[in-house]
Image (cartoon, rainbow, N blue to C red):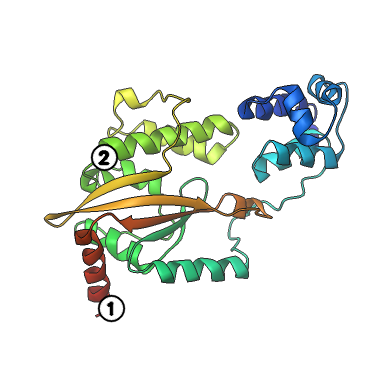
Amino acid sequence: MSETDRTAGLFPALLKHWRGKSGLSQLDLALAAGVSSRHISFLETGRSLPSAEMVLRLAATLDVPLRQTNAMLRAADHAAIYPEPQPGDSLPPQITSAVDLLKAHHEPFPLIVMDRSYNVLDANAGASVLLTSLLPSDQIIALDGLNLARFTFDPDGGYRVIENFTEVGRELLWRMQREVLAEPDQGPLRQLLDEVLSMDTIAPDWRHSDPTAPSAPTVEIRLRVGRQTWSFTLLITALQAPLTVALDELRIEMWFPADDLTAEGCRELARGSAH
């Protein structure tokens, strides 16, 4: 059975889901997309099947992620148009060059590139040397392939070095829960969430997030580095107007020192690494 056959007939439900997530009425969506409210009603009841162009117009209006836009196209019996990442795929050369420039300019402070499931795809030297310095000398960590969420909640990983683990862990877990709720078919992310929820470092009152609580634009994190406490402000950014699913799901996490002690500590680590 083809993917189209399996998903055919789901378009009305998907359209209702994304319209509801955006908080728009049928009339609001119709006005924003430049179509009649009657047509929106017919699409949501299954009385009409949209053209591919209409699916793309509605998805763009509702700010639907590209992977889910592909799902809407298939559900409406059309072919997906946005390339989806396959194992071993690399980023386009122009994106790789831009990321390399970001990494270099952010040195000696950490910068980490992740996919939507928190798998590390790339990182600068500042990130590598900092994470290495946090752990015992006999514990080797490789950033390539590291899952940052799993590492954060690992009793032998982030849990032992993050001084404000209660705030950082709770915010990360709730963010993951909201992401799964927003896109329920995210298999890898749902599996990761289930794995994290089984860890002993998860407090019982974290398990049920408040979906109305907005995600903070930044995260404050305090790390035990030797006998010192280093403080960072974490900012996560995404690409605008991506043309592929991989780029749509790319996340760049930049760590900014929150005080002079942290900034100078990062510079000292970089000098030590260079020598």
According to the picture, the residue beneath numbered tag 1 turns out to be 274
Which residue is located at x 61 percent, y 69 percent? 94
Q: Where is residue 99 shown, x and y percent of the image?
A: 51, 66
- Kindly tell me whether residue 100 is visible in this rendering: yes
Q: Residue 165 carries which label?
A: 2
Closer-to-camera residue (261/121): 261
Q: Quadrant of the N terminus?
A: top right
Q: Residue lying furthest left in this view?
A: 227
Number of marks in the image? Answer: 2
CA gap between label 2 and label 1 equals: 31 Å
Q: Where is residue 135 shown, x and y percent of the image?
A: 22, 56
Mark 1: few/some/many CA within 10 Å (<14, 14-19, 20+): few
Q: Which mark is residue 17?
A: none
Choose the circle earlier in sequence order: 2 or 1: 2
Which image quadrant for residue 192?
Answer: top left
Q: Where is residue 210 shown, x and y percent of the image?
A: 43, 24
Which residue is located at x 76 percent, y 36 percent? 58
In what element is the residue under mark 2? helix
